[in-house]
Amino acid sequence: MKIEIVETAPIEGQMPGTSGLRKKTRVFMEPKYLENFIQATFDAIGGGEGKTFVVGGDGRYFNTDAIQVIIKMAAGNGAAAVIVGQNGILSTPAASHLIRLNKADGGFILSASHNPGGIDEDFGVKYNAANGGPAPEGLTAKVFEATTSISHYKTIAADNVDLSRIGTTSHGGMSVQVVDPVSDYQNLMESLFDFGAIRALFADGFTMRFDAMHAVTGPYGSTILEDILGAPAGTVTNGIPLEDFGKGHPDPNPIWAKELMDLMMSDDAPDIGAASDGDGDRNMIVGRGVYVTPSDSLAILAANAHLAPAYADGLSGIARSMPTSAASDRVAAKLGIDAYETPTGWKFFGNLLDAGKVTICGEESAGTGSSHVREKDGLWAVLLWLNILAVRKQSVSEIVEDHWKTYGRDYYSRYDFEAVATDKANDMMQNLRGKFSQLAGQTFAGLTVTTADEFSYLDPVDGSVSDNQGLRIAFEGGGRAVFRLSGTGTQGATVRLYLEQYSGLNGDTNQDTQAALQSVRSAAFEISDMKAIIGRIEPDVIT
Ligand code: VG1
Ligand code: CO
């Protein structure tokens, strides 16, 4: 088939953020917008010639259109093969697994994750490398560079591929393999966990509600939890992926998964509740009457992972993003293994996982995962919880309370201030930065600052340095406040304020979270001058 070389010109602003390039869907639909970014990616990786790529997305509006464009451009760039999920569906962890399983050269994941979907909402493209993980910063910088000098893109004139039919066809000399999105992922999960024990748990009357939030995990949850593990029909709710996620935010937190939270706090609560995000890489865990913070979930999973077959020999190390609470560090210390602190975003865990330095990683934003893929993995976390529950034969709340008794409790909450004017958000950060050299030793809201610094990460594997990764203030008595600007939004700036207070080893673990954080919060507001600079201290979302 004839390769078409189409002239184009650079389009501004195609800089990937925390997790891929995210823009309004209509922006992605503008002529050549997607094409430019895809060609820049091919250019940044040294071309597509003879390579194999995995392609799929979370099912949001424009997903299949974008996939058809990418398939044709892969052919135009000389790729040997494309592996694509049936109907364009692949969760982010499943795509990561397919890249690794098929030894593909990389993959395109079409998703803006937790951002709402639809023609007037958000769309996104993430590129993952041959290890299955998000493109590291060095590569995203190259992609961006290529978008600023692009002059043409390559494609083929061909009919669209029928994405509904599983099987292999040839397009312009390139093979296109349409695969079941769930089966390989399901096999991977079966290889990690004791499905027999989990099946027995459900057979014993254990109950669960898994809210797929009309996003990509519906088919994965239905197959694995209901069909394979025997959870009763109806365990998975909102299980059909919709282009607009039913107009919700597919963000697994107590705000956006309110229906699930209400159920879990009621008398009719099942034994465990879980929810997943748009592209299936994040998870929320709720026990009957108890919300498990993602930072605690990471720590509890790490402390109990040896109860699942895949981790029976123990963990090599644990990594967490900087704003995530210190709870998992306490587990690492007790296990005598290394703890790593990385910037926000899964791309920073890839090197540690590849080098075998860590087995389990996590973020406060409800992402947890392990060395089984190179992405965070929502359903994996849920299955590990189920495996632990099946072995320990205790409730979620008993396990959480036992954990706090052993390690102390890290009270934790994140405040999001959305759609802040970008210049004001930058002013606030700049003002705060300017105070840092003077803060140590000063007291605010009764708390004395021990250290104040801007987080910079030195990757212990490749020696790369990532600066400006968040402003952190630590207080005497185990409190901490962190400020950073989100890198996934598409409108204005989102200020994230992360608050944490350690109870101490034998301290009170039964306080209300917001009450326990009161001093740290007041100190953070005071030090940052938030009210004066951005005009508010009332967050849009508290998680
Ligand atoms: C947010 C989260 C971060 C996560 C990222 C991508 O980034 O805070 O922990 O890795 O989303 O997750 P930011 O820059 O907005 O704080 V996902 O599930 O959107 O791919
Ligand atoms: Co996600």
Image (cartoon, rainbow, N blue to C red):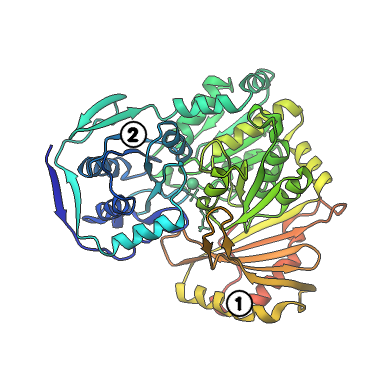
**Residue 452's image quarter?**
bottom right
- Foreground of the two, 391 or 122: 391
Tag 2: residue type?
Val
Which x, y percent locates residue 265?
A: 68, 41
Q: Is mark 2 within 8 Å of ligand 2?
A: no
Which residue is depicted at the point 63% across and 33% down? 384
Relative to residue 400, is residue 282 drawn left or right? left
- Foreground of the two, 105 or 388: 105
Which x, y percent locates residue 240?
A: 43, 33
Q: Mark 1 sits on what residue?
A: 432
Q: Is residue 266 visible?
A: no
Which residue is depicted at the point 30% across and 29% down? 177
Tag 1: residue type?
Leu
Q: Mark 2 sits on what residue?
A: 84
- Foreground of the two, 23 or 99: 99
Indicate which disc, 2 or 1, sits on the residue closer to the N terminus: 2
- Foreground of the two, 126 or 222: 126
Assign a secondary structure to mark 2.
strand
Relative to residue 320, is residue 187 drawn left or right? left
